[in-house]
Amino acid sequence: MGSPKEGDKSKMPATISTLEELLIDQMQDLYDAEKQLVKALPKMAKAATSEELQQAIRDHLEETTNQVARLEQAFEHLQKQPKAKPCKAMRGLIEEGSEVIEEDAREPFTDLGLIAAAQRVEHYEISAYGTAKAMAEQLGQDEIAALLEETQEEEKAADSKLSDIAEGLYADAKNAGSMGEGEERPARKPMSSPRGTSARAQKG
């Protein structure tokens, strides 16, 4: 094979030769991933049938918007302009979520499918932020490490919340499997009151 044409050199990725450059590369990947999620999460919330799941996704959308801003702060600490590097992994995960939305599924299977897709996203982000945080710590960039850790903790909390919602839907899924076509499933019991708050206190 011949050598690359002169005009192709500008399209070749820059060589990464320092840990800081690798950290920036990871942050650019995350920056694109979060921006993709800002566009995808409203569609997931609209497709969800459980009010609890809808609200959880909306809450995480707000968090994701803040996470984009947090990454921009991290770029500022490195005196770099925020720049997105196409995140193919997130694109694929979002496409899987889109497939769930398009599938013809009864309640609560759509919601459980959305939770499965969303948790794959969370697990990817938890890992990616953890790696970037470790790099920042090695560079002595404590401010950046703190910003990345804050987002990582939010992703862990979102993942845990999704697991809790799924637990409440599994009973519905089992009941739906044993019900005849056209039968209405019974309404789910409301969630228990927050810890430390008794039913009597709620009544006033």
Image (spheres, rainbow, N blue to C red):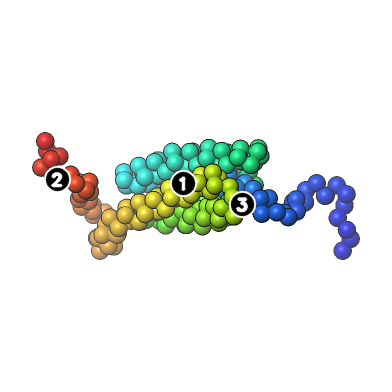
Asked if residue 112 lies left or right of residue 191, the reply is: right
Seen from the viewer's position, the closer of residues 74 and 125 is 74
User: Mark 2 or mark 1, which is nearer to you?
Assistant: 1
- Earlier along the polypeptide chain: callout 1 or callout 3? 3
Q: Secondary structure at mark 2?
A: loop
Q: Are marks 2 and 1 in contact (CB under 8 Å)?
A: no
Q: Nearer the viewer, mark 1 or mark 3?
A: 3
Between the residue at mark 2 and the residue at mark 1, the CA separation in whole angstroms equals 32 Å
Count neighbours of disc 1 (C-alpha within 10 A) and say few if under 14, some if 14 to 19, many if 20 or more.
some
Quadrant where the image shows the N terminus: bottom right
- Residue 105 seen: no
Q: Is residue 11 visible?
A: yes
- The residue wearing badge 1 is 150
Which residue does the numbered mark 3 point to in the structure image? 139
| Residue 109 located left or right of residue 28 | left
Q: Which mark is residue 198?
A: 2
For badge 3, the amino acid type reads Leu
Q: Tell me if 15 is positioned left or right of 186 in this view.
A: right
Q: Please report the residue visible at 31 percent of the width from the left and 45 percent of the height from the top.
A: 52
Q: Badge 2: how crowded within 10 Å, few (<14), some, or many (20+)?
A: few
204 lies left or right of 177: left
Of the image marks 2 and 1, the number of the one nearer the N terminus: 1
* Point 22% across, 51% down: residue: 188
Q: Position of residue 98 (x, y in %)?
A: 49, 50
Tell us which disc is closer to us: 3 or 2.
3
Residue 133 percent location from the top left of the image? 54, 52
Query: How many numbered discs?
Result: 3
